């Protein structure tokens, strides 16, 4: 486990808890047992704790190799040490004991499937070089009891099979059904080195969904602000940072512009994310773009304002901040995480746009002011642009 920990520190620039190191040791012992089979080639590729770029998500275990006809395959395995879990009435959500108490978390099959979907939607090597991903979950301490394998979760189990304590041979057979030969084509290296940009199919589906939502049509000066933001995003780089501040009262269409920007930048193959302090607007717009309240890959494009504490400089092309007046200095449950959310957002992106209504600040913790944004933009060496929406529009 020390070897893994050292690589973990080197790759992610931080350490982890003794409990996580202990969990690696236990889970990898079970995986070693599963892989002890002549039908699984010795020269398969293996990745442990692979971090999906531009997210905090990590895939526990990846095994790569080739199929019978030379296809490139990667098996993504979500490992859990759980011994009990309970059903809920929420899509893809279960209850189990984690972090010192019973909490609601994503079903392991959903977790594994969502990670595969993220890579398929945003990793250019995966979608352009036809690397086929097969997700699954392995709960090596869990005795099958009808909860995690309930019919309620079958949609996700079909996408990512779940294997329990007595299913080691079934997991082995699942791997062998796909991987026949070792990794002859550097599959893991190609995934690791893959450029992060949204796939055309993801962009096309977003564009078509936007067209079906008439409330997202841009009117008058909304169009002017949108085109200015689009031009600034395109010309921004790590040596040409730009910050756009858009002032406007309620009903001026700030959110309409934000969503149009998100979709158009994605269509252009650029990594863009919609940011808000509160989860409610993210959930509303995510559901409008997907046509469903079910979680999908689009979820990765909607972020909380505290998501950029550990992000590298200029890692993201564009961050689109709605309700910027609600930003806080620090994030987390106790407002003790990070340094300053405005600073972190500007630091993390080549281009950031802040939609703000200073009259709508609600609590003493709200620090979203034009002066504060300008201060941190200047600190980052970014060019500052200010526009104002004055017309009142009714928006959906």
Image (spheres, rainbow, N blue to C red):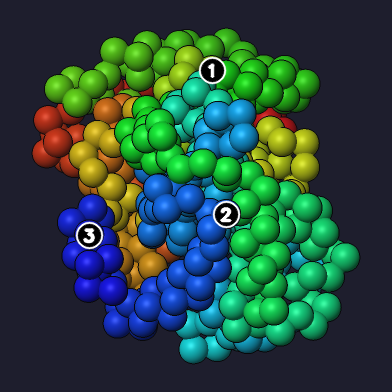
Task: Check if mark 3's residue and mark 2's residue have beta carbons within 8 Å.
Answer: no
Q: Is residue 230 above or below residue 27?
A: above
* Residue 238 horizontal side relative to residue 199, left or right: left
> In the image, 5: left or right of 28?
left
User: Could you tell me residue 170's position as x and y percent?
Assistant: 70, 65
Residue receiving disc 1: 267
Q: Secondary structure at mark 1?
A: helix
**Residue 284: x %, y % from top left:** 67, 44
Give the CA separation, mark 3 to mark 2: 29 Å
Mark toward the start of the polypeptide (3 vs 2): 3
Q: Which residue is mark 3?
A: 7
Residue 89 is situated, as x and y percent measured from the top left of the image, at 82, 69
Label 2 belongs to which residue?
A: 39
Along the viewing direction, whichever of 206 and 118 lies nearer the viewer:
118
Circle 2 packing at 10 Å, graded few (<14), some (14-19), many (20+), is some
Which tag is nearer the camera, tag 3 or tag 2? Answer: 2
């Amino acid at each position: 486990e020390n070897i893994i920990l050292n690589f973990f520190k080197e790759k992610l620039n931080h350490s982890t808890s003794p409990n996580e190191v202990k969990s690696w040791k236990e889970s990898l012992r079970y995986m070693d047992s599963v892989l002890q089979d002549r039908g699984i080639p010795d020269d398969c590729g293996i990745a442990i704790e692979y971090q999906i770029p531009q997210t905090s998500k990590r895939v526990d275990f990846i095994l790569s190799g080739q199929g019978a006809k030379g296809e490139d395959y990667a098996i993504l395995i979500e490992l859990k040490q759980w011994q009990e879990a309970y059903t809920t009435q929420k899509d893809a959500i279960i209850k189990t004991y984690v972090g010192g108490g019973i909490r609601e978390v994503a079903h392991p099959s959903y977790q594994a499937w969502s990670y595969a979907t993220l890579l398929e939607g945003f990793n250019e090597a995966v979608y352009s070089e036809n690397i086929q991903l097969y997700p699954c979950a392995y709960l090596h301490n869990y005795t099958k009891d009808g909860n995690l394998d309930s019919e309620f979760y079958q949609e996700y189990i079909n996408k990512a099979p779940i294997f329990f304590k007595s299913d080691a041979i079934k997991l082995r057979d699942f791997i062998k059904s796909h991987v026949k030969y070792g990794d002859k084509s550097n599959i893991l290296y190609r995934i690791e080195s893959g450029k992060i940009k949204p796939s055309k199919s993801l962009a096309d589906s977003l564009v078509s969904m936007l067209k079906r939502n008439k409330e997202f049509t841009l009117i008058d000066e909304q169009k002017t602000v949108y085109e200015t933001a689009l031009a600034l995003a395109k010309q921004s780089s790590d040596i040409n940072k730009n910050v756009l501040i858009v002032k406007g009262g309620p009903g001026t269409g700030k959110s309409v512009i934000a969503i149009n920007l998100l979709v158009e930048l994605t269509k252009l193959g650029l990594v863009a994310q919609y940011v808000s302090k509160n989860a409610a607007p993210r959930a509303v717009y995510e559901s409008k773009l997907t046509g469903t309240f079910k979680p999908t890959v689009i979820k990765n494009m909607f972020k909380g304002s505290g998501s950029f504490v550990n992000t590298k400089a200029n890692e993201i092309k564009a961050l689109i901040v709605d309700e910027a007046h609600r930003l806080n200095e620090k994030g987390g449950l106790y407002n003790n995480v990070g340094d300053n959310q405005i600073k972190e957002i500007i630091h993390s992106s080549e281009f950031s746009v802040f939609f703000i209504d200073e009259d709508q600040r609600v609590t003493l913790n709200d620090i979203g002011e034009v002066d504060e944004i300008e201060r941190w933009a200047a600190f980052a060496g970014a060019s500052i642009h200010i526009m104002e929406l004055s017309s009142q529009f009714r928006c959906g």
